[in-house]
């Protein structure tokens, strides 16, 4: 994005880009049930309340197989919490065919849907229970029209079979009502574009719906696999929403609410016990909750609704030390399992502060790192986004909105240090986020 440029778009043009765009649009968040082992019903109520307040419509409950006891307990807690709140928020299943170590048996999918799809909290679309997946391409025939699952219970089916590629999906278009692409992070030292989204939309045709994924960050820090890796986050949270406005999908899915192991979370932290092995040092004291603050604006804009900017707001996110301030500790850039060439991790992110401003009217935005000279940016009414190099500067970061020579709002973010503050000397590729 160009600095100082207005990011207001013509939504009428965006809304026409998908043939089914006249129907109701929804915004979801991907909630990893496998990372909720310590959740109580009250925790689920808090998650749902926060998501509802952020203008999200539903959680996609990512559930793996085999069904460890706590998974069924947490799904029951989620539905009990949703039904107790009765605030219009919905839940639906995203059956994860890779995350649990085994593929979902059709009989188990049917059992879960029969138990929960009749709940007032279960999301329906076109009067059918809404269902998604994460992969599952070896079990495609279970989802065929008239197949094992669909013979037992009819659903509005929007899977993520991204590994097939656009040409590989073609034989199965009659199996799906829509499609969810996992292509939401850039490869290598580049920024994300909407090219892959447009290719998927073209492949599925105008009579199918599309879930467009939006993610704030990505750093796979869990241990136990062959490697740990990063994809570029940087400006992604701001850029990706602009791509949503341009593409105009039927659905948007924030990925994720709570995936601590991949640093893509926007939800609250509850317990060390919910963090996958190896990831705690990278997510501890690294909140992302402030990234939700602009969601009401983003989601209203995505849906084509008016949004009253009643106060000046900013949100900002950045790593807390330069790449030179720590060791890579075996972390690589890109995911070889996804067919990507591994590169030096330090070639992926940039040593910058990233920040957005939602302004009532034109104003100057000022950013100061430590005792160094402040840098000024010309903001316009509406949404603005910029980034600023560390340039070896350290200290707490102060963000200010200045209008007519007076500071009308300001906030101070976490301190940037010259070296990593992790005890093992490893670089933390995760970001800290704040707002006012």
Image (cartoon, rainbow, N blue to C red):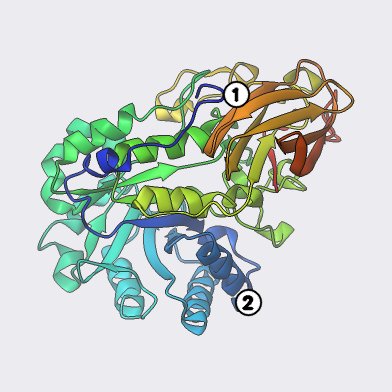
Label 1 to label 2: alpha-carbon separation = 38 Å
Where residue 169 appears, as percent x and y from the top left, is 19, 39
Q: Which mark is residue 332?
A: 1
Where residue 75 appears, as percent x and y from the top left, is 48, 72
Q: Which quarter of the picture shows residue 348? A: top right
Q: Which mark is residue 359?
A: none
Name the residue carrying label 2.
Answer: 42
In the structure shown, which secondary structural element does the residue marked by tag 2 occupy? helix
Could you say which is closer to the camera, residue 399 or residue 280?
399
Q: Residue furthest front?
A: 404
> Is 197 placed left or right of 63 in the picture?
left
Where residue 328 appears, as percent x and y from the top left, is 71, 23
Tell me which residue sits at (82%, 29%) in the image. 420
Tell me which residue sits at (38%, 48%) in the image. 302
The reply to whether residue 12 is visible in this rendering is yes
Q: Residue furthest right?
A: 371
Relative height, residue 66 to residue 6 (above, below)? below
In the structure shown, which secondary structural element does the residue marked by tag 1 occupy? strand
Could you say which is closer to the camera, residue 143 or residue 68?
143
Where residue 185 appears, as percent x and y from the top left, is 46, 32
Badge 2: how crowded within 10 Å, few (<14), some, or many (20+)? Answer: few
Could you say which is closer to the camera, residue 396 or residue 117?
396
Tell me which residue sits at (53%, 62%) in the image. 51
């Amino acid at each position: 994005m160009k600095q100082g440029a207005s990011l207001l778009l013509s939504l009428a043009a965006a809304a026409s880009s998908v043939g089914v765009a006249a129907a109701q649009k929804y915004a979801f968040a991907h909630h990893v049930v496998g990372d909720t082992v310590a959740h109580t019903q009250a925790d689920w109520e808090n998650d749902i309340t926060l998501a509802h307040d952020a203008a999200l419509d539903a959680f996609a409950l990512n559930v793996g197989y085999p069904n460890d006891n706590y998974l069924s307990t947490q799904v029951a807690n989620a539905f009990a919490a949703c039904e107790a709140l009765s605030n219009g928020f919905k839940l639906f299943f995203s059956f994860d065919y890779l995350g649990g170590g085994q593929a979902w048996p059709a009989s188990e999918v049917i059992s879960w849907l029969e138990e929960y799809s009749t709940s007032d909290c279960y999301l329906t679309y076109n009067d059918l229970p809404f269902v998604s997946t994460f992969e599952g391409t070896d079990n495609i025939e279970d989802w065929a029209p008239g197949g094992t699952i669909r013979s037992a219970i009819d659903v509005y089916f929007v899977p993520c079979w991204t590994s097939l590629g656009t040409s590989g999906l073609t034989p199965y278009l009659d199996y799906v009502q829509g499609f969810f692409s996992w292509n939401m992070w850039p490869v290598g030292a580049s920024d994300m574009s909407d090219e892959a989204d447009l290719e998927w939309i073209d492949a599925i045709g105008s009579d199918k719906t599309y879930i467009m994924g939006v993610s704030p960050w990505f750093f796979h820090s869990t241990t136990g696999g062959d490697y740990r890796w990063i994809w570029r986050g940087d400006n992604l949270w701001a850029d990706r929403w602009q791509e949503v406005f341009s593409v105009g999908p039927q659905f948007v899915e924030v990925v994720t609410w709570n995936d601590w192991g991949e640093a893509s979370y926007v939800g609250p932290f509850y317990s060390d016990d919910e963090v996958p092995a190896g990831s705690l040092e990278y997510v501890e004291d690294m909140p992302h909750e402030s990234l939700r603050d602009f969601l009401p604006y983003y989601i209203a804009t995505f849906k084509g609704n008016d949004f009253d900017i009643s106060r000046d707001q900013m949100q900002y996110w950045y790593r807390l030390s330069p790449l030179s301030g720590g060791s890579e500790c075996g972390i690589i850039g890109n995911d070889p399992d996804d067919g990507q060439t591994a590169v030096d991790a330090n070639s992926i992110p940039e040593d910058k502060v990233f920040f957005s401003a939602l302004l009532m009217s034109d104003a100057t935005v000022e950013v100061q790192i430590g005792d160094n000279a402040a840098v000024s940016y010309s903001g316009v009414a509406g949404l603005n986004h910029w980034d600023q190099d560390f340039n070896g500067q350290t200290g707490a970061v102060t963000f200010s909105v200045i209008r007519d020579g007076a500071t009308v709002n300001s906030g101070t973010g976490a301190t940037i240090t010259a070296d990593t503050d992790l005890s093992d000397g490893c670089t933390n590729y995760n970001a800290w986020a704040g707002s006012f």
